[in-house]
Image (cartoon, rainbow, N blue to C red):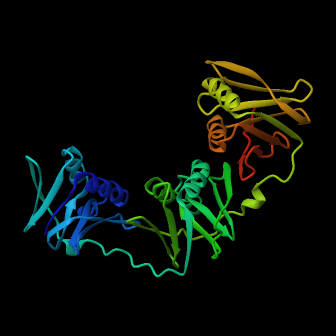
Amino acid sequence: MKFSVARSELLDALSVVGKGMSARSTLPILSGVLVSASGGEIQLQATDLEVSVRRSCAALIEGDGQAVVPGKLLTEIVRSLPEAAVTLETEGETAHIRCQHASFTVKTLNAKDFPKFPEVVVDKTVSLPSNVMASAVRRVSRSVSRDETRATLTGVLVLVDGPSLKMVATDSYRLAMSEVLLEDGGTESVDVVVPGKALDEVTRLASDNQPVTVGLSENQILFEFGQTTFVTRRIEGKFPDYKQIIPKDSSTTADISAEELSAAVKRVSLMALHNSPIKLSVNVADQTLSLSAATQDVGDASEDLMVKAEGNDVTIAFNHSFLMDGLSSADSETIRIEIKDAEKPGLIKSVEDQGFLYVLMPVRTS
């Protein structure tokens, strides 16, 4: 195998397939990238057996073939090279990489030992604008659980129904939901739980101006955008009934500038150490929201903010980190906080965008 390709093109392709490379596998082959050359292009593949990524790019092919090259090492070599044509040539179990006056020799692995790229027989497909998809993922991704023992919660529920795209994530302490209307409503209805990490990677890799085609099979999900194919497993199991978690009514509402509230929460939470909660107290008569936090043997902090409040006076406590995540995810100028009482979940909404809400479980305080 021998080919030449622009350094920037090769680095882009390696950066993409690197998302599928296994970092901690006991199988050395999974830390490699399968490089194939034929028909005027090269194809790069990587997999950790859960996620598989393939990327193709145009190249000058002087000899067809395949080889598995250590992925991290190849990426670092290409990144270090000047912006010029890179030539890769294999000879037996060795790959020679040349660019201008630089030359590297790297040991390769047998391409026959590399896992085959999944052949996904798609039952349903839907095309989503990458910028809309990325916005929805950004709003819910902080609420995805990292606890692998509850696999369903490590995913994002993706629902497409006509012109509506809805994404929901929860780790049982908070829940985030983002809903947007698609300009070109999909004809297929979709109801699938997608691994949160995979959604994050796809939205980072897809550029803003290209659509992402999502294909579903019985146990796999296929994403295609540009010259990239990304395959991940479907998460099995039933996602929690999010509609039951969202509070139906409230006794207190408070509208406030998101920027002011975020800044105040950051300041006051400096005194919320060792998982101490942050308290929110709404005084309707004074039209104020008071924030306070205290850590025993360290100190305390408080701050009062002007709000537009209706209903009853109420005090509730939240995990300050989760509260901050909700405010950041809202991506709004004005926030509406809805509270039933100190023991029921609180609700954060974007006033300008009715398509976002964030449910936060309260913390008991002594």
**Residue 127 in picture, x, y percent from top left:** 55, 69
User: How many callouts does the rendering have?
Assistant: 0
Nearer to me, 293 or 60: 60
**Residue 308 in picture, x, y percent from top left:** 85, 32
Residue at (37% x, 57% y) in the render = 19
Going by the image, does 184 lie left or right of 16? Answer: right
Going by the image, does 70 lie left or right of 347? Answer: left
Residue 24 can be seen, yes or no: no
Going by the image, does 201 lie left or right of 252? Answer: left
- Please state, as top left, top right, bottom left or bottom right, where the N terminus lies in the image: bottom left
Residue 318 can be seen, yes or no: yes
Going by the image, does 252 lie left or right of 242? Answer: right
User: In the displayed structure, would residue 152 be above or below residue 283?
Assistant: below
To which quarter of the image does residue 181 belong? bottom right
Residue at (67% x, 58% y) in the render = 180
**Residue 226 in picture, x, y percent from top left:** 41, 64
**Residue 202 in picture, x, y percent from top left:** 47, 59
- Please state, as top left, top right, bottom left or bottom right, where the C terminus lies in the image: top right
User: In the displayed structure, would residue 142 be above or below residue 202?
Assistant: above
Residue at (63% x, 23% y) in the render = 267
To which quarter of the image does residue 320 belong? top right
Nearer to me, 97 or 289: 97
